[in-house]
Image (cartoon, rainbow, N blue to C red):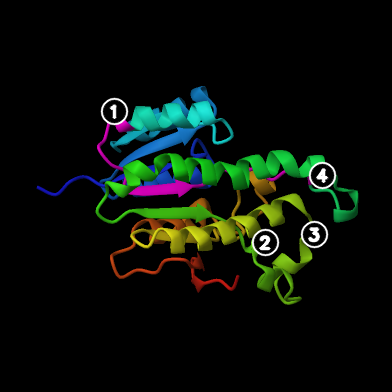
Amino acid sequence: MTEMTTALVTGANKGLGRETVRRLAGLGWRVFLGSRDPDRGAAAAAELVRTGLDVEFVQLDVTSDASIAAAVDAIRQRTPRLDVLVNNAGIGGTRAMPQEVSAADFRAVFETNVFGPVQVTNAFLPLLCDAARPRIVMVSSGIGSLARTSDPGRLESTLLGLPYPASKTALNMITSQYSRALPGMKVNAADPGYTATDLNGHAGVQTVTEGTDAIVRLATLGPDGPTGGFFDRTGPVAW
């Protein structure tokens, strides 16, 4: 009998995270929906369960060591391993122009977008190591690509800011480093593209389904799939 694939998606009570949960659970997977807000997270999980999907809510604040540890314990009680970790939780922070940004503006963004994925990944490594083909997906952004933001022909070059773009550039390097430190795992970064979510006031031109294409592809990689790369729904993205 084939064992059921298990996955955890952080920041998953809405938007890209919730859609990722829905699509992975739609493959017949058992998916843990991580959310900082217990009420919203439980409601999102219950809604998906009502459609017949195997989804379980786990309270998880990626900025809290205690919350992360509790989430690890909760998931360990329900499954002997974790096949896929999707580090999706993220915040946008200030939209002020670079010359108006202070160091304080960076702190909350980096706590969630940079330190969070590191803390969550390290905490779940024991469960990931017990999987036959573990995969880690870091949800990044094209605005974290130095190549794209320096190309005047790209939309990303017109979006000025400091904390959020810098956090995603940092996450890209973190992805690269983990991929080489963990050769037995597939570790990649996904660029969802300009997707209509709360993060951009629903100004994005893609649906959340389109925005999760790269995430789902990287979460479902086979043994010959890439590691240490950056991908959007059309293919590789230049760092």
Task: Give the mark, 1 or 3, whose residue is nearer the N terminus.
Answer: 1
Q: Which residue is mark 3?
A: 160
Q: Which residue is mark 4?
A: 103
Q: Secondary structure at mark 4?
A: helix
Task: Give the mark, 3 or 4, whose residue is nearer the N terminus.
Answer: 4
Residue 75 lies in the magenta-colored region: no
Q: Tell me the distance, in whole angstroms, between the alpha carbons under discs 1 and 2.
A: 38 Å
Q: Which residues are magenta?
A: 76-94
The reply to whether discs 3 and 4 touch (Cβ–Cβ < 8 Å) is no
Task: Give the mark, 2 or 3, whose residue is nearer the N terminus.
Answer: 2
* In the image, farthest residue toward the top: 39
Q: Closer to us: mark 4 or mark 2?
A: 4
Q: Examine the residues drawn in magenta and state their main secondary structure.
A: loop
* In the image, farthest residue toward the right: 99
148 relative to 161 in the view: left or right: left
In the rendered image, residue 200, in percent from the top left (x then y), is placed at 68, 49
Q: Is residue 214 visible?
A: no
Q: Which of the 4 quarters of the picture holds residue 42?
A: top left
Q: Tell me the distance, in whole angstroms, between the alpha carbons under discs 4 and 1.
A: 40 Å
Q: How many residues crowd mark 1 within 10 Å: few (<14), some (14–19), many (20+)?
A: few
Q: Tell me the distance, in whole angstroms, between the alpha carbons under discs 3 and 4.
A: 16 Å
